[in-house]
Amino acid sequence: MIRLDKYIADTLVCTRSEASALIRAGRVCLDGVTVKKGDVRFDEKKCTVAVDGKTAGYKEFIYIMMNKPAGVVSATDDVREKTVLSLLPEKYMTKELFPVGRLDKDTVGLIILTNDGKNAHRLLSPKHHVEKEYYVECDVEFADSDIDTCLKGVMMDGDRTKPCVLKICENDRKCAHMILTEGKYHEIKRLCGHMGKNVTFLERVRFGSLLLDGELQRGEWRELSEEEISMLG
Ligand code: URA
């Protein structure tokens, strides 16, 4: 059972008071009947809600894909630095969003923001083997032997890193794709460092089976569909 004003605020991504105003204005129907009280409770699995005549299926959680630009930090708040959350419009500020895992300040590309803590935890846990793919450019060419090094793992923070798939680009061996299923601090940069290279550019291009949307410019974002959310892993 859920309150109508909460249902509307979650589904339309607005504040409770904005939802209440919509309800009071008679723009919300519950199973075909106009309801003007926000505190009405109903079963969101059985009832149909419509706003201005359009069915509004319940959306409990928000998932956003952002193409992170360089120069912003992937934290919820930071006193000195600009954060990924600050790139979103005001209406998301009350929704308790946070980034699913961290990208370094100079790393660009696919970052997911959500308020679904349980699923975020699962997506990040190495136990669940959710792949994160990065495109990396280094100052030195990759050697074929690096493929084995990444697969076998290196010692990091007192642990061996989980197998990392390294795919060296054929046309430029200073570039590669690296696939991780865990997220140790600076893992790609430290793996490359171990192989005698400095990372000069790093972009996350895939999370689970969800690819970075090529239509999104750096700093742009969009909400994910239900199907895309299930592609995360
Ligand atoms: N590995 C890194 O070194 N940096 C990132 O931002 C992500 C993975």
Image (tube, helix red, strand yellow):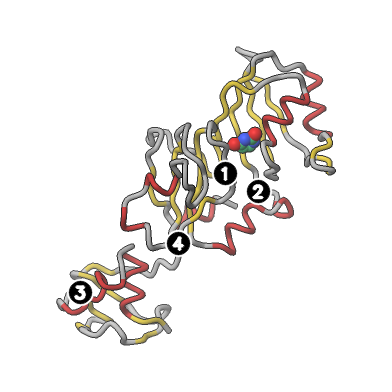
User: For numbered disc 2, what is the local secondary structure?
Assistant: loop
Closer to us: 54 or 164: 164
User: For numbered disc 4, what is the local secondary structure?
Assistant: loop
Closer to us: 68 or 93: 93
Cα distance in 3D space between marks 4 and 3: 22 Å
What amino acid does circle 1 point to?
Phe
User: For numbered disc 1, what is the local secondary structure?
Assistant: strand
Q: Which mark is residue 96?
A: 4
Cα distance in 3D space between marks 4 and 2: 24 Å
* Relative image position of residue 177 (x, y in whole percent): 63, 28
Residue at figure coordinates x 58%, y 61% from the top left? 119
Cα distance in 3D space between marks 2 and 1: 7 Å
Which-is-in-front pick, marks 3 and 1? Answer: 3
Q: Which residue is mark 2?
A: 130
* Relative image position of residue 89 (x, y in whole percent): 32, 51
Please say if the residues under marks 4 and 2 sit with CB atoms less than 8 Å apart: no
Please say if the residues under marks 4 and 3 sit with CB atoms less than 8 Å apart: no
Give the answer, above or below, for where 53 lies relative to 90.
below
Local packing at callout 2 (Cα closer than 10 Å; few below 14, some 14-19, many 20+) is many
